[in-house]
Amino acid sequence: MPAIMAVKPDSARSNPDSTPQKRRLRSDTTAAPDSPISTPVKWKSPRTCTTSSPKTPISRVERDCSENITKSHKSPIKKLSDSLTPTKQKWNPLDSEQMKAVKEAVHVSTAPPNIVCREGEQKRVLEFCQACVEQEKAGSLYVCGCPGTGKSLSMEKVKQLLFHWANEAGHQQPNVLTINCTSLAKTSDIFSKILGESQPRKKVNGATSPLQHLQNLYSQKPQPSGMKMMLIIADELDYLITKDRAVLHDLFMLTTFPFSRCILIGIANAIDLADRFLPKLQSLNCKPMVVTFRAYSKDQILKILHERLMELPYTVFQPQALELCARKVAAASGDMRKALCVCRSAIEIVEAELRESSSNFSSSIVEKAFLEQQRATAPVFLEKQEIDVVRLDHMVVALSKTYKSPIVDTIQSLPQHQQILLCSAVKLFRGGKKDTNVGELNKFYMEICKSALIPPVGILELSSICRVLSDQGLLKLGQSREDKSKRVTLCVDEADITFALQGIRFFRNCLQSPFQTKRYQSLASMMKKAAGLID
């Protein structure tokens, strides 16, 4: 009865009084291969093994167990990450060629190999252009969004996708005219460029303007051969805004003529440009379609940075450094160009640090006799000075340089009671108030002083502090006969005060609130981690 005998070894195993000889026999794999006592020890759990049985040979069970254990310890996530993240060599910042390649990779003017995180916006613009080409119908589209959100790059990508689609679908490729409106000497010159693209050999008479030629051209039925569709991409469109808004209006009106072949895409930063400057288009039912590019999030900035650095055969940035950059830029503006500038600044900080360390080392080798005696320790010294990656502390310095504000410097240089008064104003105005009086501000000031066991100043001195802060442009102080009744308004952003004072624990605790501005809160937490890593 093997089932009954299989229970015995377990009970014997759990018995603390079992003899060493018995334990040795049970652990001995060479003894009695078909023994019913030793076999259950080698059995696998029924949940992990469905092929074994009491009659299965021990060698086969042991082999299956070892294979299953090996398989169970292989994490599919780790395996996937290993395949996606190839091992890169160390970066040598002293190599001029490598340094040049790294700087070019994060330069604003360098086009990335792939445009990521804007697939949805590109799809909408591409579908609009495809519909216009298929129907041979003019149309207008307005692309808006904050600076550095990938508008211009996305339009270049759409242009390539449109050409590829036209070839595959058997449509005639449209002519493309890309204009940066800042390069125009006069706003009306845009019509000359459009006419030159539509009819290159057409000579304009002095009596007829290029705009009138275009209006006449798009009012007449084209020849059977027909004109090709023309994609006009007008970047920095807000430079065409004049006092009478005539140029901007006439440009969009070109798409409303019966035989127009224009596909107009205007790009600008103003989200409500069409509503403010083109109300007549809405009344004519030809208001342009609007595609908005939102500011980049932290994850999107991080992904774009990784996409740019992926082409390099070496690792340049610590992951924590890139994450800090992405968090700060996303919280401040979401401008990808700003993130690239910060990364480039961090690289230049590493470069300057290396120059400084090399100059210090070269000055120390003047004493040749000393170095000859210390040859054994010289490699250790050099190893300590080696920098092969942009660290978190480099990124912190680069961020502070990029987002340095004179207001922050002013707040940091104030005496303690003036800083406490600013904290009081921040806490008071968080409730949605626009202004208050000196008497009410004094109550908040007294509470903060009491919590920190700091002797407060009197009401007259507090009023004088308000005047000093008003002279520095931090507060606005109204007029009144009584000091307590004077109106007080905060003239600086709460985030600037929070960022300026977050390095002092007392003020950091004082300003903590669920309504605290997120953009500097994330930077403060990352700077804490940076300090921990540096130490």
Image: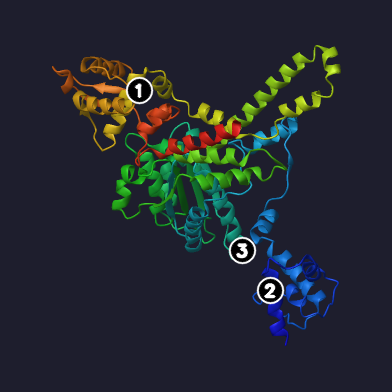
Residue 469 versus residue 274: which sits nearer the camera?
469
In the rendered image, the vertical position of residue 424 relative to residue 125, given as above or below: above
The residue identified by callout 3 is 168
Residue at the spot x=70%, y=72% of the render? 12
Relative placement, left or right, of 525 versus 306 is left
Q: Of all residues shown, which one is farthest toward the left? A: 481
The residue identified by callout 1 is 419
Q: Which mark is on residue 406?
A: none
Picture quarter containing residue 350?
A: top right
Residue 74 is situated, as x and y percent measured from the top left of the image, at 69, 61
> Please, what is the three-letter code of the amino acid marked with disc 3?
Glu
Residue 94 versus residue 514: which sits nearer the camera?
514
Residue 108 versus residue 313: which sits nearer the camera?
313
Q: Between tags 2 and 3, which lies in front?
A: 2
Q: Secondary structure at mark 3?
A: helix
Q: How far apart are labels 2 and 3 at the CA level?
A: 72 Å
Residue 533 is situated, as x and y percent measured from the top left of the image, at 59, 34
Relative placement, left or right, of 104 versus 498 is right
Q: Secondary structure at mark 1?
A: helix
Q: Between tags 1 and 2, which lies in front?
A: 2
First in sequence, mark 1 or 2: give its number. 2
Residue at the spot x=58%, y=31% of the render? 393
The residue identified by callout 2 is 10
Q: Between tags 1 and 3, which lies in front?
A: 1
Q: Contact, CB < 8 Å: mark 1 with mark 3?
A: no
Q: Contact, CB < 8 Å: mark 2 with mark 3?
A: no
